[in-house]
Image (spheres, helix red, strand yellow):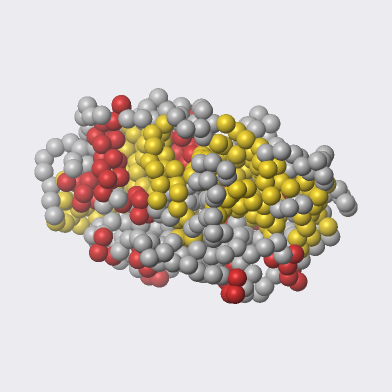
């Protein structure tokens, strides 16, 4: 058995009945041209048994298996419509399609085997659930080798799926199971400290709590994610042990990310593509809702073509496809899909836009005069009902002016509020004098000061503003229509950079120690703005928002992120101009 951290804490499990577990019932069913074997026993190397539902074509032959590894229950049919505004409906799915997983009927009809599994420590399986641990890697490895050696298998195993079903692919692919022949990570975290548990060193408290509740169905023990998050506030061996060594991955990979999943999968999926060593690898980045995009027929077809090439040996056009495909967004579900040769784009012109607190602007010229933007983050100013932030964090209902264009029912826009000390934010704007595309990574460098505290939690959003002064909404996560261009975060005491991993356009922080601020001390910080793509026409504006709390906040929706455990109190002060070169380094893409 793989060694576990000595300080590992487990939480109380939830009864299987509460999760709708139908009971252990091994049987074989034939339907719709598919043979379904329920509760197939799979032995692991230490003697623990896990259980899988195996879907096979109802015809003779050897077929490539596709593994979908996740803790949410192989029995459970998640109804996406119940998550709200996903663009998916109950009638879109058959009873066999599991959460964030592929449709077994489609894949069996196209010559594949689908394996949905309950991992160790989940549901009816014995052992302890320790997520993304070395134990879990060994278990997935064993399942791959089991699947690759069955009498119905052609020996070439693939993996697919969204979120956890993608995380698991990074981790096990780096271990090189002999029968693993291709992976398709679709929106998957690859650095669990920086992308899941903490954002810029600030604890994530909304998604993580929801997620832990959804993985506690067990008869044994489940790792207590929230307790371990509190126990390990810095990046250490515990977090490093959950991350894959991406450079060790060499199998063919079709990697899919979105600009919309900031604070969860966006960064990790793009980093996964950048860092894996696979000779055959492709990146697709879109601006749509993640679950809707995964199930689009044209995207399912692209998945199949990829696996046809590398699992079935079909000589199709996949190897000739451009290595990178991106969507350059204009507004909600409007954008141009374009192919590129690499990521980041080699022709990027990184441009500094300096902050000027004197007139709340962004400019290409460093302001000569020093000025400050100051906003209040005292808890006395925090509204007890955080739902006030559910629409663009605006000041009041009176500040929201809706304007619906008759030709576009999704074009409802909201008038922006001004700088307000009680609003916990400061804003800076840049009006473009010509058509301008921003695509890539960004670095926001600020000179900051904490009044009344020795630390600052900084929350950053980039927004698009139309010529009339209205916010241009974009898709956000899996079920929101009113998202930003990009987000970023940083706890100032975590500002120390990893110089080996950082670039001018993408700061990477060590998170190894806290560097508190002294009274009156002004320090430079570099804030990573997550990868994005957006097009501005002449007269449109880029707005930079810096605040002391979540700028896009959906308290009743656990599938987005939130940060309620902040260090903020007193005032934040942003210093600009003169010796304080506060700027946004943005990726301007020249036309071809």
Instruction: Using residue 566 as the reference point, say whether residue 83 is left or right of it.
Output: left
Query: In the rendered view, does 158 fall on the left or right side of 403?
Result: left
* Residue 29 seen in render: yes
- Closest to the observer: 450 or 589? 589
Q: Disc count in the image?
A: 0
Please name the residue shown 64% across and 38% down the image: 585
Please identify the quadrant where the C terminus is shown.
top left
Q: Is residue 146 above or below residue 73?
A: above
Residue 462 visible from this viewpoint: no
Q: Residue at x 51, y 28 (%)?
A: 347
- Looking at the picture, tell me which residue is in the foreground, 207 or 174: 207
The extreme top residue here reads 279
The structure residue drawn at horizontal position 42% and vertical position 31%, both measured from the top left corner, is 340
Is 42 drawn above or below residue 80 in the view shown?
Answer: above
* Image location (x, y in percent) of residue 302: 28, 40
Q: Residue at x 60, y 48 (%)?
A: 431
Residue 213 in the image, given as x and y percentages of width and height: 49, 64
Residue 442, horizontal then vertical, whole percent: 60, 40
Instruction: State the image coordinates of residue 251 (x, y, percent, origin top left).
Output: 38, 30
Q: Quadrant of residue 311?
A: top left
Q: Residue furthest left?
A: 59
Q: Could you say which is closer to the camera, residue 43 or residue 476?
A: 476
């Amino acid at each position: 058995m793989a060694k576990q951290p000595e300080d590992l804490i487990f939480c109380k499990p939830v009864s299987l009945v509460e999760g709708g577990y139908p009971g252990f019932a091994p049987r074989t069913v034939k339907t719709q041209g598919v043979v379904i074997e329920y509760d197939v026993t799979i032995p692991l190397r230490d003697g623990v048994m896990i259980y899988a539902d195996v879907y096979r074509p109802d015809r003779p032959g050897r077929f490539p298996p596709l593994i979908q590894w996740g803790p949410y229950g192989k029995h459970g049919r998640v109804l996406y419509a119940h998550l709200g505004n996903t663009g998916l409906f109950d009638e879109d799915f058959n009873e066999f399609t599991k959460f964030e997983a592929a449709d077994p009927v489609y894949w069996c009809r196209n010559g594949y085997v689908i394996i949905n599994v309950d991992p160790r420590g989940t549901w009816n399986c014995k052992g302890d659930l320790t997520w993304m641990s070395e134990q879990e890697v060994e278990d997935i490895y064993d399942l791959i080798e089991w699947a690759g050696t069955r009498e119905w298998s052609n020996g070439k195993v693939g993996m697919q799926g969204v979120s956890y079903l993608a995380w698991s692919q990074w981790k096990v692919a780096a271990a090189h199971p002999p029968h693993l022949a291709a992976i398709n990570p679709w929106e998957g975290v690859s650095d669990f400290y920086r992308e899941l548990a903490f954002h810029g060193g600030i604890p994530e408290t909304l998604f993580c709590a929801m997620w832990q509740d959804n993985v506690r169905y067990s008869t044994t023990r489940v790792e207590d994610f929230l307790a371990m998050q509190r126990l390990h506030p810095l990046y250490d061996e515990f977090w490093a042990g959950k991350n894959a060594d991406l450079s060790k991955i060499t199998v063919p990979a079709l990697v899919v990310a979105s600009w919309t999943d900031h604070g969860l999968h966006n960064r990790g999926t793009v980093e996964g593509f950048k860092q894996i060593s696979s000779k055959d690898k492709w990146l697709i980045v879109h601006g749509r809702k993640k679950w809707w995009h995964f199930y689009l027929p044209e995207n399912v077809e692209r998945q199949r073509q990829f696996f046809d090439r590398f699992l079935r040996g079909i000589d199709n056009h996949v190897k000739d496809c451009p290595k990178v495909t991106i969507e350059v967004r204009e507004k909600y579900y409007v954008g141009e899909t374009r192919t590129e040769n690499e990521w980041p784009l080699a022709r990027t012109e990184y441009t500094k836009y300096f902050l000027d607190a004197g007139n709340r602007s962004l400019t290409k010229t460093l302001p000569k005069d020093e000025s400050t933007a100051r906003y209040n983050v005292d808890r006395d100013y925090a509204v007890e009902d955080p739902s006030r932030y559910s629409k663009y964090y605006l000041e009041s209902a009176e500040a929201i002016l809706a304007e619906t264009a008759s030709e576009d029912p999704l074009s409802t826009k909201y008038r922006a509020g001004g700088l307000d000390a009680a609003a916990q934010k400061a804003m800076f704007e840049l009006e473009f004098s010509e058509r301008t595309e921003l695509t890539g990574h960004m670095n926001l460098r600020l000179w900051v000061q904490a009044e009344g505290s020795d630390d600052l939690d900084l929350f950053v959003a980039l927004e698009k503003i139309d010529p009339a002064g209205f916010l241009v909404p974009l898709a956000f996560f899996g079920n929101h229509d009113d998202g930003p261009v990009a987000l970023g975060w940083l706890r100032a005491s975590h500002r120390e950079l990893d110089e080996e991993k950082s670039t001018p356009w993408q700061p990477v922080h060590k998170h190894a120690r806290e560097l508190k601020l002294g009274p009156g001390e002004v320090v430079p910080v570099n804030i990573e703005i997550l990868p994005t793509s957006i097009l501005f026409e002449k007269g449109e504006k880029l707005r930079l928002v810096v605040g002391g709390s979540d700028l896009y906040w959906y308290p009743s929706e656990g599938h987005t992120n939130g940060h309620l455990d902040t260090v903020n109190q007193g005032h934040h002060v942003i210093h600009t101009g003169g010796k304080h070169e506060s700027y946004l380094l943005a990726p301007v893409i020249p036309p071809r």
